[in-house]
Image (cartoon, rainbow, N blue to C red):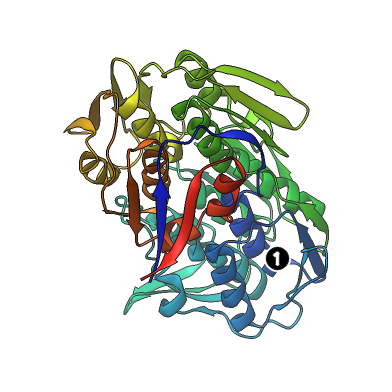
Amino acid sequence: MDKLLITGGSRLEGEVRASGAKNAALPILAATLLAEGECVLSNVPHLRDVTTTMELLGRMGVVLTVDERMHIHADASRVKNFEAPYDLVKTMRASILVLGPLLARFGEADVSLPGGCAIGARPVNLHIDGMRAMGAEISVENGYIHARAKRLRGIRYSMETVTVTGTENLMMAATLADGRTLLENAAREPEVVDLAHFLNSMGARVQGAGTDTIMVDGVDCLSGCKHHVLPDRIETGTYLVAAAMTGGRVRVRDTRADLLEPVLAKLRESGARVDTGNGWIEVDMDRRRPRSVNIHTAPHPAFPTDMQAQFCALNSIAEGVATVTENVFENRFMHVLEMQRMGADIQIEGNIAICRGVEQLTAAPVMATDLRASASLVLAGLVAEGDTLIDRIYHIDRGYDNIEEKFSALGGVIRRVHT
């Protein structure tokens, strides 16, 4: 089994490229099921979740090829299998995103209830309730969602809680529905906006993405198109936090500062100099120790839950005491227990982590428990004294493209080992 071996103490310096956003690429890949022609996607990250999604689409009959420019060509004109089986869905919750496209275009879908990261309850009831309201007949039996519909109809639907995948699934379903759909209390994340751009390039009529009300006027069919996936704001933020923690200076290129405003504000608060330009962000800590910062996670445009673990790592070695309040997922402090093994002084009280910064973490064998937790352990390993061995890094391979190569290029001492 692969592990990451990290020798701490190096100051990170240099430039690294941001990959495409996983959380945009996955729904966009699912949305290719809606098209009657070929879709060509660029800036898709090389991740395990992307490979899993491509395997899932391939089993359904989507013809997928990758050209010399690493563009993915997807042709769903010969889809004949409408099942998303458990053996694939169990590894990745985003597989639920094929439900809306299959039901909207083909009138049937059999999708296994999802698995994925153990970071708390993420029920799919809003997906199911919304599609039932659109006229689908849905039953849940033996761990599968069985959905049928002649043609979905437009509705006004208010989601009781903000859900990114729920918003995306219903938005995709609505593109081919009869009439107008209004989705209220919709998620506002940049990845939802990128999906809307892709759908509109296919001929959909989606308005309001990025606000809490999305309006979709259904059309009869959608065509193929080309689309460039937006940069990954979470990967970008992870490298910027690493720069701050190591007292370094790192520029991330092929990214966008407007996607990361809450994160950049907290980095400035920690004492880092943050500069931005057209397609790049640079953090310079000038060899200084960061200051602790208080964090409150919430849906976009507030501070993203996917950056919470990284700032726990920063606070663990920062000057002062700070609190990290997790308001999105109820079980997302599992990384704290592993960081405590490295000497972090963090106390958990309900949904709040109280972080008292220590001057030096010490290396220890640790285990990744979910995708972003694994990133925080990498950051902790980069500043810890000694050699940190991180187990179960398949979590990190789900969301970070060549993380050891990118950190090595910045001066980090990190390599993949097989034990």
Question: Which residue, as the protein is rendered here, is positioned at the far bottom?
Answer: 80
Q: Mark 1 highlights which residue?
A: 32
Relative height, residue 164 to residue 69 (above, below): above
Answer above or below: position of 48 versus 378: below
The quarter of the rendered structure image containing the C terminus is bottom left
Q: Is residue 401 visible?
A: yes
- Camera-side residue of 132 and 392: 392
Q: Is residue 369 left or right of residue 300?
A: left
| 213 left or right of 68 in image | left
Instruction: Name the foreground residue: 140 vs 260.
Output: 260
Which residue is painted at 60% across and 63% down in the image?
152
Q: Quadrant of residue 51?
A: bottom right
- Residue 181 at x, y percent in the picture: 62, 48
Q: Which percent across, then down, holds residue 231? A: 67, 43
Q: How many marks?
A: 1
Rendered position, 216 above or below 322: below
Q: Position of residue 388 (x, y in %)?
A: 33, 49
Q: Is 266 situated above or below 25?
A: above
Residue for point 24% across, 33% down: 344
Instruction: Please tell me whether mark 1 sits on a helix, a strand or a loop.
Output: helix
Residue 333 quadrant: top left
Percent position (x, y) of residue 158?
A: 48, 41
Under mark 1, the amino acid is Thr
* Residue occupying the point 53% across, 53% down: 404
Q: Quadrant of the N terminus?
A: bottom left
- Count neighbours of disc 1 (C-alpha within 10 A) and say few if under 14, some if 14 to 19, many if 20 or more: many
Quarter of the rendering containing residue 407: top right
Quick check: can you spot residue 107? no
